Each structure stands twice: as C-alpha cells, then as structure tokens.
Amino acid sequence: MPKDSQSVFPVHSRTLGASGGAPALALHCALAHGGAWKGVVNDLGDRLSVTAPDMPGHGKSDDWDRRCDYHDAVTDAAETFLEDDITLLGHSFGATVALRLAERHPERIRRMVLIEPVLFAAARETAPKAFTERREAARPMMEALARGDTETAARVFTGTWGVGKSWGQMGDQARALLQKQVRIIEETEQALTYDSAGLLKEGALERCTMPILFLRGAQTEPILGEIHAALLARLPDAREVVIPEAGHMAPITRPDAVAAEIAAFLDKT
C-alpha cells in the first residue's frame, strides 16, 4: 500500500491480473492511464498481480499542481507501491520512471520490462544526429505550448506518439482531455531530453543487475532504437525484442504480441 505522506502526490491505482500472481507494478505512458495495461495483463493470464497507478494529472488521479519536478513526483508516487521481489513494467515515459526506480532500489526488483523508454538524453552522445532530429521534430509542439495553443500541441504529439487515430477521428471528450493533459509533456523535457534526474550518470545504470527485457515496435520512431542501444550497452543483463507490425503504442495496439514476449521472459527469469 502507498505511504501516507503529504510530500508524495496521491495517485489512484487499480489492480489487474490474478490475485495469486507474482507482484508487479505497471507504469503507463504520458497522456494515458493505468488501465492501458489491461489488454497486456489479461493476455498474461494468472502470471502477474499488477498494480497500475494513474500518474498525477492522468486517469482518476488529481490534476497535476506543479508542486515540484514532474519526473520526481511520478517516481516518488510509484515508489510507494514497491515491494520486495517485484516485477516492473514500464512503457514510454513510464519506462523511464521504472528505470529510475530500479536504480534507486535494485535489490527489490526481480526483473523489469521496458517498452520504448523515451529517455532521449541516452542518444545524445551515441547518436547525435538522431537526437538533434528528434528535438527538431518536437519543436512545433513545444512552440505551440509556449504560445498556449494546446490544440496544436496535442494534435502534433498524438500524431507522432499516438495509437494511429487522426485528430479528427477522436471524439470531442478525448480531444479536450488531451488538450488539458498535454502541458505535462512540457514538464518532462528536462528529465527526458537533458537527464535532469541523473539516470545516465556514471554507475547508475550499472546498478541495475536484474534481468531486463526491452521491447520495441518495428514501426516506431527511429530514435527509440538508438535509445535502446545506448542503454543496452551499459545494463549488465538486458536484451531487446522487436515486435513486428507495431509502433510506439504496442501495449495498446498489439497487447497479444507484447504479452507473449513478456510471458517468455517471465518463464526464463
């Protein structure tokens, strides 16, 4: 159960999977909610008992109040759900939080599945061209946020990182929610692009000696492959599997394929 502490942002959580399964914590991507893991967890059957919190400003959690750095807040909130011998699952932004938890508490993590962690800073030195191209591609969204144009920002963001629906295909309620949430993306910039949280500092990744599975969609943004390569080079026990016919949102668009790879990983670890 989460700690009762005024210093930690209170978040809503749900339990997915089998009550008798191995304990797991699943961290969703930005602009989603913990329920995004339902398809994957259902396909895993009785293997895992999953706690899936909603990040601040997402799902049924309260609106984000900007009390501190957003990556710090999400990590501190997620940390309250940790228990010994736990399996961590993380997707996109959530995968960067999972990695940070593993660096903080390597002795408590049994294994970890990271699906396309958007830690762009990892590619800054190893793939500078891809890093620069990613920054330029994000510029229209960041400029829209700077001038308060949340509709354009949300449309650009979902066009790159969404499930494949165009802005016009979404309902009014979905578009309104995305416009409300998209400002959070601006608050992740320092952690993801410049590693303000220190995930890449000397010796940090090397502390994560647990088995780690990286999953990447074959049709995802090219920089994700560069990020994976940079992280794999430093993590002691990590491997990557590419999901065919999948993009960045594979846990939602290809839950069966994602679950199959996770199941095989669970069997081995």
Image (spheres, helix red, strand yellow):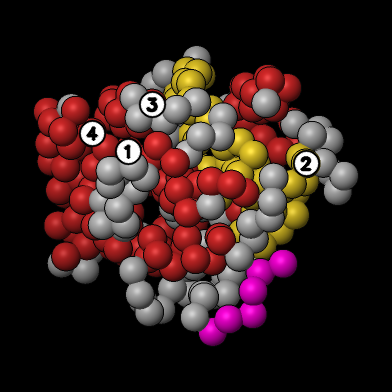
Magenta-span inclusion, residue 3 = yes
Tag 4: residue type?
Ala
**Image quarter for residue 31?**
bottom left
User: From what the image shows, is residue 227 above or below residue 268?
Assistant: below
Q: Earlier in the sequence, mark 1 or mark 3?
A: 1
What SS does tag 3 mark? Answer: helix
The residue segment tinted magenta is 1-6
Tag 2: residue type?
Ala
Tag 3: residue type?
Leu
Find out whether the residues at labels 2 and 3 contact each other: C-beta distance under 8 Å: no
User: From what the image shows, is residue 7 above or below residue 226?
Assistant: below
Residue that label 4 marks = 123
**Image quarter for residue 2?**
bottom right
Horizontal relation, residue 167 to residue 260: left or right? left
User: Distance between the Cα atoms at labels 4 and 3?
Assistant: 12 Å
Disc number placed over residue 232 in the picture, else none:
3
Q: Earlier in the sequence, mark 2 or mark 1?
A: 2
Find out whether the residues at labels 2 and 4 contact each other: C-beta distance under 8 Å: no
User: Distance between the Cα atoms at labels 1 and 3?
Assistant: 24 Å
Of marks 2 and 1, the one in the foreground: 2
Residue that label 1 marks = 160
Of marks 1 and 3, the one in the foreground: 3
Badge 1: few (under 14), some or many (20 or more) residues near its Cα, within 10 Å? some
Of marks 1 and 4, the one in the foreground: 4
The residue that appears at 73% across and 22% down in the rendered structure is 267
User: Distance between the Cα atoms at labels 1 and 4?
Assistant: 18 Å
Disc number placed over residue 22 in the picture, else none:
2
Between 44 and 147, the one nearer to me in the picture: 44
Magenta-span inclusion, residue 99 = no
User: Distance between the Cα atoms at labels 2 and 1?
Assistant: 34 Å
Q: Position of residue 203 (x, y in %)?
A: 34, 42
User: From what the image shows, is residue 252 above or below residue 12?
Assistant: above
